Image (tube, rainbow, N blue to C red):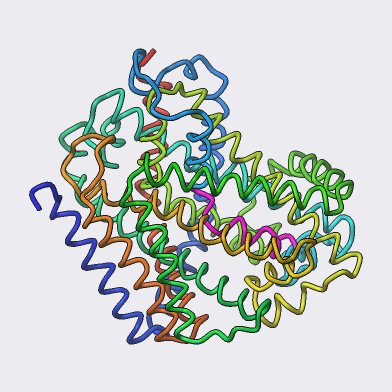
Amino acid sequence: MKKIKKRVFIPALAVVGGAAILGCIRGDLLSGNLENLFNISLDKLGWLYQIITAITFVLCIILSFSKKGRIRIGGEKAQAHYSFKSWFAMSLTGGIAVGTITYGVSLPMIYFKNIFGELDGFGIAAGSEEAAIFALGRIIHEWSFFPYSIAAVSALCIAYMCYNMKKPLSISSCLIPLLGDKKAGKLATVIDVLAVIALVLGLSGSLGGGIVLIASGLKLIYGIETTQTILIIITMLFAFVFIFSSIRGIKKGVRVFANINTYIFYLLLFILFICGPTLFILNHTTTAFGYWLQNLPLWTFDTGILGGETLVKWWTIMTWNFWIVYAPVTGIFLANISYGRTIREFMIVNFFMPSLFAIIWFGVWGGTAINWQMEGVVDFVPIIQQVGPLSALSAFFNNLPFTKVMIPLMFGLLILSFATSADSNIIAVSSLCIKDEGLENEAPIWVKLTWGLLCSIIACTMILFTKEQEGLLAIKYMGSVGGIIVFGVFILMVISTIKIFFIDKND
């Protein structure tokens, strides 16, 4: 217990545990109040989310191509701890979670068929060729360079302050260039507590989505009913994999699972690209990229006046919020594995390459789904409307070639994708709860176990003791409100990054 920051660990544990208990007792009350708070924040702060995200995007571009890119994290003599392949695998899977897999099919279809009114502000006919290009182009905007810039800026700021400036392992260290050591130190505990709460709640929401996704897939594909026993078994499987990986540590756990996960990603992409509508994928993804570039200025700063509330508020800005929830704590993990690399290399692995992967992934999966919808192979619309977006993935896999191989691969990918995202974040959260011993030292096993079990318990109980969708909404809004809390800290981190690299002397 001597290594533990009790002022961080105990308050964070109390708040998260209290929210979980309230959610189990009155899930409707919790989700309703959090939804109202979240709605107010997006209505009042949507413009600020857009501006800050745009700034992080520009920062990543400038830092990549300017002379600042030659600065080495850890100093000129620092040596990298991981091979380029493992580094990219951990970076990619540390942030991808189950979102890219889940929405790889459903989100392009939602936009393409205007299921919730996403095209209303543009006068585009649902199901048309233009709608297909819009769908893929909009996803490029929301799931590639912009969100990854949020994670990259946070991680770079933490890496530089902890490794180059030799400051304590705390998110508040990123505020030292703005506030000075004394003031930043006073805020350290509060900031770290808020970051831990936001990340744990966000992680619980992701786990809840993963549990329901697996359960719905088992029901749709194998006819296995979604009982409480099935939900508990799925939760235990998820928990075992990611807690085991986090306890094993980065080198023996996270790195191994990340490499396996990445190979499965590559295999599924290759199979679908070759066996799917290859020419359709190439043509529409290429055109969609140009469409995104053409609309980039407007989409970057539209607060919903032109694009409409459904698209901009409930998809774009909510996506930025989701990434900001993870950004400060995930930044600790990304900073850790980036030691010894230059800023230019850092941006290649944490900004450019994962963004390109996302474009390819959505182009292949989303392009195939759109083609199938056009050709009448499968109708995703009633599935999404009646069962939910999560079920679209199962319907998609049911129509793939080599079904007996692809479906088990899908379930394995879902479990590994969440695990490799969760284990890295559990390690990062746990590191904020121990007294400063440097980025390279990990927290005791029992601390990792505590947060891992708590995330699993929150996700499972919120689904079991409330109506399934009500419980998921409560978790979702808990995480989103956590993002609102962290948003102010994130803004200061962005300003601090600008000061570090463009005002202060650091060459």
Q: Residue 144: x and y, percent?
A: 62, 44
Q: What stretch is highlighted in magenta?
A: 94-108
Name the residue at 59% across, 40% down.
354
Name above or below for residue 342 compared with residue 491: above
Q: Residue at x 49, y 48 (%)?
A: 95
* Residue 78 point in image, percent of width and height: 35, 18
Residue 99 inside the magenta-drawn segment: yes
Magenta region includes residue 414: no
Q: Which residue lies furthest to the front in this view?
A: 404
As drawn, the residue found furthest toward the left would be 2
User: How many numbered marks are there?
Assistant: 0
Which residue is the extreme one toward the right?
375
* x then y, percent, for residue 232: 42, 78
The one nearer the camera, 407 or 100, is: 407
Q: Residue 29 lies in what quarter of the image? A: bottom left
Query: Of 195 and 364, which appears nearest the observer?
Result: 364
Camera-nearest residue between 84 and 351: 84
Q: Quadrant of residue 419?
A: bottom left
Left of 496 or right of it: where is 293? right
Residue 178: percent from the left, percent from the top?
29, 32
Q: In this rendering, would 168 be left or right of 283?
A: left
